[in-house]
Amino acid sequence: MKKKPAAAPADPNSLEQQAQTQLSAGKYKEAIGLYKKLLKISDHNEWHKKLAYCYVQRATALAAQGMFKEALVLWENHRQHTHAPYAAYDQYIIWLILSKNKARIQENIQQLSAQQLDKEYPALAAVLGLLILTEHPEFALDLPQDSMFIAHLQQVKMALQAYQDNNREKLDEALKQLPYRSAFKDLRTVLNALITLPESIDQARVLLAKIPDNSAYSNFAHLLLVSTFDGAELAKNLVKLSPAQRNIISNIKGFNKTQLEFLTHLTRQYEHLSDKVKFNMAIQYQSLCGTEFAKNYCQQLLVNYSAGHKIFKKNFGAVDEFENNRLHALACERQGNSYDAEHYWRLCIKELIGQHLEENNLKIALILRHLSKREEPAEKTELLIESLQYDAEDRDIYLQILQHYQQAEATKDYKLWLSKALKKFPQDIDILIQAVREATRNKTYKKASQYATKILKIDPLNTFAKQTLFASHLAHAYRLMREKSYPLVAKEIALAEALNIGKIYVKQTQLMRALLCFAHEDKEQGLQLISDALANLYTDPVNRHFHASMAALSAGLPVATILRVLPPAKDYLLTESEFTQFIQLLEQFINEADNSQIHKALEKVKAPLKKALTGQDFAESTLRHLCKLLEKLEHFELLRHCAKTAFAKWQEPIWMYYRVYADNNGKPEDCTYRELMSLEHYHEQAMLAKDFQVGIKLQKLIDRYYHAHPQSSMNFLDNFFGINDDDEEDDKLDILFGHLSDEVVMKLDETVESLSKKTSIEQVAIELIQSIGDKSVMLAIMQEPDLFSALMIVKAADKLGINIDVSIEDVLAYYGIGKRTSSSSFPFPF
């Protein structure tokens, strides 16, 4: 038999590369094998170092899994490839302690220096300290006696003796001698917590929470923390402890015989606590928790444990009707059955109302508010309003109602509830701030100033109120400048400056003084001061031009003259921060100035704004903010540009809203049928996503369209489902398509809806005119809404490949348009 050829010797370079790869990937077991092979080839010092490193890392990983004996073997192997000081030596000794190898523990701790014990190995020092104080006091003799550890150990022994002697003064003195970095610092915290009990439970919990989970004293801290609990929290923690640990807690708490029996019973049954077991335990041990608690607890269990009614009645009497309904409602909620839950809550309310007790009003209000949490905004608000009939003192409910009407843009309702809130809480700052904002939106600045002044009387440092008064002074100054009452302008500027609310506001008053100089003193100097003031306010020319235009228009000064001294803005590309600053400035002017003036000012910066929208990748939230302002301003040109840019990036409902709104200049009644279908589609998407605010906005556009075109509110195939029964005999769609089955109709309806989102009436008419050469088709479609519906049904059938025995020519012939041909295919490609 031939001998096998000897294997080719391994390539050291390849082996080293493999070993390094495994080491870098944290695969230390594989790396160890490869480095051992390398050392058989050559005795390189670098390979010894890396092998030693891998041994230590592998040992640490095994120790983390509780495999201490295996970890010890690997760590000891690493010493063959390196020299002292050894890596992870403190961990090695801790593993020895956890393995309970006393002889080797003592052998190794005898080699520790004071430097290692006091500074280098804090975790080991803490473990040794605990070990010396509990199981092995003799270990103290094996440690360097000149170490700080030994000195601190003596202080700790004195502290423990003082605690046993109940000598608080000596205990405090001994604990003060322990520095922050002592190995016994966590024990000091435990003792400090212990002496606060039972008088200051909260303070004890705060102290115990400071001890980290990896501390040698964490078990002591946890047991002491559990001892501060009572009731359900105590029971929940006790069942997780060992019998020995439970005995410690029982001793600390001073449990009596009955309590110990209950604890034993609970521990045995904890994994199998059925409603029946819990019910019987509550009755058996009601002396521990009190009859009232046991009664309420058992009544809750009756919802799912109906067999307990007889026992309950025997021990506690008949079940209260209100409480029974309340517990049923809660049980339904736990099961996710909100419909039945509401039924039981309403029964609760009925029961409370029937009792005619004033103290029930708050309960009724709380139930209604609880029900409101599961509802959509409109229904939620109705329930909140209903709750105020029973408890009108909850300020937060008023604020929630106001928030809903504000988001829903229900101005009339918002004003009504703001008036009610102000009457109820005339000194409430949050409600007064709402009043300021509403007055500002309505441009009733005098009223806004009055509310702001009232806020400052309550809170003299309120920044929002100061900002409102500042804006009021400047607005008045602009009006006075238009009237050429220059001395009074200076007075208003001084009043604004006296509010002293920040550097940015100082810059605004500087601009105001510059305008006053231009208007009343020296035009050349004024222009220079205006340019300097705007440069202090903004780094970019776009914001400067916009603010300058607004300031000039508000003051009745020549816009062109002022803009000429500023750097050109037309070709400037705004950064995101500059664009955000522009949006903030625009919002400020919308609140403070006339819309016609803002439109004129925007004309001056329209070009760079469009450039920024096209050339920069702004955040969606930034563009939403801008569109919201442009909508309020009714600046449809910029709104169109912004919405088109945004919709190309994010096909979200809000962008379809802005697109349709802007494309039709704020008149949704003028939108195309395709746009209407898009609105309805995205409205559905918004509601599914629970974006109710956007859903409401889309619904308003749809409602306005149908209000202007009531005949369009019918679905294409509504007649197939029995709508318009009065016209059934004359229904043209029924004559053309009445022979189709319900199943086919449903398929066609879905496809028609999809096609309608992509196809306008105008597009259908134009393509038909090109196909049949009859220009009257446009007029026919406008006069006969059903004609468009019929054409779309045929197109849908063609798309689905369904033979409905009706062609496009059949439809046109039926409506008296064009000439009938033999072709049955759809003649135009939309």
Image (tube, rainbow, N blue to C red):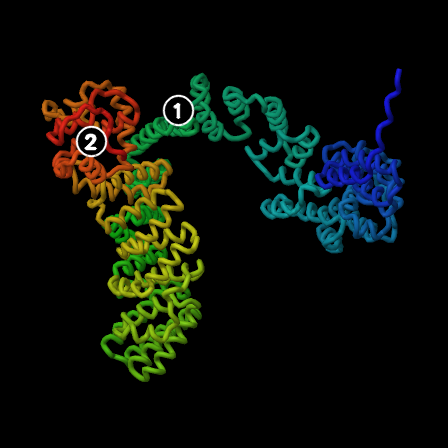
Disc number for residue 319? 1
The residue lying toward the viewer, choosing from 62 and 806, is 806
- Measured as percent of width and height from the top left, residue 465 is found at 36, 64
Q: How many marks?
A: 2
The residue lying toward the viewer, choosing from 826 and 369, is 826
Q: Residues within 10 Å of mark 1 (few under 14, many from 20)?
A: some
- Measured as percent of width and height from the top left, residue 286 is found at 52, 26
Disc number for residue 288? none
Question: Mark 2, mark 1: which one is toward the viewer?
Answer: 2
Q: Residue at x 34, y 58 (%)?
A: 433
Q: Residue at x 41, y 59 (%)?
A: 580
Q: Is residue 598 visible?
A: yes
Q: Quadrant of residue 429?
A: bottom left
Q: Is residue 476 visible?
A: no
Q: Quadrant for the C terminus, please.
A: top left
Q: Quadrant of residue 426?
A: bottom left
The answer to whether the residue labelled 2 contacts the one labelled 1, judged by CB atoms less than 8 Å apart, is: no
Identity, as a three-letter code, of the amino acid under mark 2:
Ser
Residue on which the image places disc 2 = 789
Q: Residues within 10 Å of mark 2 (few under 14, many from 20)?
A: some
Image: 165 above or below 466: above
Assign a secondary structure to mark 1.
loop
Q: Residue at x 36, y 65 (%)?
A: 570
Side of 93 relative to 426 (left or right): right
